[in-house]
Structure formats: C-alpha cells, structure tokens
Amino acid sequence: MKILKKLLGLAPKPTEDGAFSPSRLALRLATSSKTDFDGGEYSNPYTSGKLKVLMVCTEERNMVMANGKRFSTGNHPVEMLLPMLHLRNAGFDIEVFTPTGKPAKIEMWAMPNKDDAVLELYRNYVGAFENPASLADFVENSMTDSAPYIAVFLPGGHGAMLGLPNNPDLGKLLHWAHDRNLFTLAICHGPAALLAANDGDPRDFIYNGYKIAAFPDAVDRQTPIIGYMPGHMPWKFGEKLNELGMTVINSKADSACHVDRRLISGASPKAADNFGRLAASTLLDVAHHR
C-alpha cells in the first residue's frame, strides 16, 4: 500500500526532522504558484501611522497526529501574507509576534512562488518573521489602554492549533482587545487560537454566540486521503469552539468571509484575498472616523 501511494503521489513527504509535509497530489490540489490578489489598491488609505495591527504567529512546527506521526506545519503563507498585503496597502503597520519571540514557523511548501507581490512582502518581512516580538513581553509590559493598535490578526495554517489555543498570554491579549473594542481577524485554522480566551465557563467565553467562517472539521477529516497530512487530526478546533457557543457558518473550505461585531473571519486560502480586503476596508472605515 505504501509503494502504491508513493507511485500515485499520495504519500506524504518525509522531512529532515522526521515529520511529513503534504504529498505531491495534495500540493497540486491544495496549493497554487499564484494567488488571486486583487492588487490591493485603496482610494483613501490611512496615513496618520498611529494605529497598528498586532499579528500573532505560531512558533511551533510539528503537529503530532492521532496516529503519532508528525505533520510539518506552521503559518500558511497565503493566509498570512495576502491579508497583510491588504492591511499594508490600506496604510496599517503590522507587527509580528510569537508567544516567546522565537521565529515564526511558515509552511514554505505552500508559498506561491510565482506571485511577485506575495514574495516581495515576504522578503520585506522575513527579518520580522525570524526575529519577532515576544507576546509574553508585550502582555507584561506594553498592553495598556494607550497601546496604538486597531486589530489583532491570527493567521491560518494548522500551526495556529499549536501553542496558541492554550496560551495564557494570548488569552489576556484577546480579552484586552475585546474589552477595548479592537478588531480580531482570524482565517482558516486561525480561529483555533480564539480558544485561548476560554476561562473555563462557556457562558463567560467572550465569543459565545458569535458566528465565524473557518476551515471545517469535516474537511480536515478528508485531507489524509490525499496525503495532505500523515494522519487524522489530534483534535478538532471547530468542535471545541462550538462547545463554547460559536457557530461555523460554512461547510466547505471555500471563499466565505464573515463579520460578527468586531470579529472578522475567513474560511480557507480561497478566502484570503476577500478576507484581506474585508478586514482592511473595515479597519479603514473605523480609523477614518476616529
């Protein structure tokens, strides 16, 4: 069976550290060399430079699957960089954070390597990805009412399920953003990080009653078939969010986006451009009226 899967391009590829990245077939079906970036032009961008977007990335690489095999993941480049393009073009500075300041992990196998706009932005931010700010330090020393932020951004990639959903500093950040009426932006698996705001009682969960677009658990159950992952998920983030009172509105990994109060969400890499446009336009409208 293993030989047949390899011949058919269904076998996940082993990595140097003993994990696995997606199979040849999965890469053909689930990634693209170019994105659908719409150019990111904004007629009335934000120019004061005061309000920033705080982006929290995962610093962990490998997810241990239900069968014990490890999946080489991280932040999905399209779900991170495409919204960043829109936010930057709309006039917002983006600051990169990880939980402790270790380098942000990126799913380089999903990089659209023929998309000039995405690659240029990646090159401009590679230093920040390699040397991000520490969320722990920010929460301890800089998370004040006067901190100049308009939004918290949680990019996608299965890596959002590693080290973020149970991170107490992220939980404090989400509560802080919610209490200050800042926006929270989350795409694909990024909403898994919202679990960090869970204080134990579902009735007190700050997103109880919210609707979101996110990567469906049902689709994650199917991806091992094409070798995207080397096994089934160790847990399902949509299921856990549902237990806390949230509802995922989409059943497919499509271009769906949604706004519920100050939470802006997108379903998958297919939603990245629409999500970026929606987030940037919404933030612009608020910034111009402050």
Image (cartoon, rainbow, N blue to C red):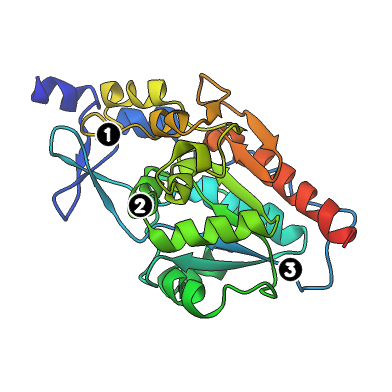
Residue ID at (61%, 33%): 210
Among the two numbered marks 2 and 3 on one chain, the one whose residue lies closer to the N terminus: 3
Of residues 250 and 84, the one nearer the viewer is 250
Query: Callout 2: 10 Å neighbours few (<14), some, many (20+)?
Result: some
Q: Mark 2 near mark 1, Cβ–Cβ under 8 Å?
A: no
> What amino acid type is highlighted by mark number 3?
Leu
User: Closer to us: mark 1 or mark 3?
Assistant: 3
Residue 116: in sight, yes or no? no
Look at the picture and state if 232 lies above or below 74.
above
How far is disc 1 from disc 3 in space, using C-alphas?
A: 38 Å
User: Closer to us: mark 2 or mark 1?
Assistant: 2
Among the two numbered marks 1 and 3 on one chain, the one whose residue lies closer to the N terminus: 3
Q: Which mark is residue 51?
A: 3
Residue 92: in sight, yes or no? yes
Residue ID at (43%, 29%): 243
> What amino acid type is highlighted by mark number 1?
Met
In the displayed structure image, the side of residue 289 where residue 120 appears, left or right: left
Residue 195 image point, x, y percent: 43, 45
In the displayed structure image, the side of residue 265 where residue 30 appears, left or right: left
Q: Quadrant of residue 237?
A: top left
Residue 262 image point, x, y percent: 69, 46
Residue 284 image point, x, y percent: 81, 55
> In what element is the residue under mark 1?
loop
How far is disc 2 from disc 3 in space, using C-alphas?
A: 28 Å
Quadrant (top left/top right/bottom left/bottom right) for the C terminus = bottom right
Residue ID at (61%, 48%): 185
> In what element is the residue under mark 2?
loop
Q: Which mark is residue 229?
A: 1
Residue to which mark 2 is pinned: 166
Of residues 213 and 203, the one nearer the viewer is 203
Q: Which mark is residue 7?
A: none
Look at the picture and state if 121 lies above or below 161.
below
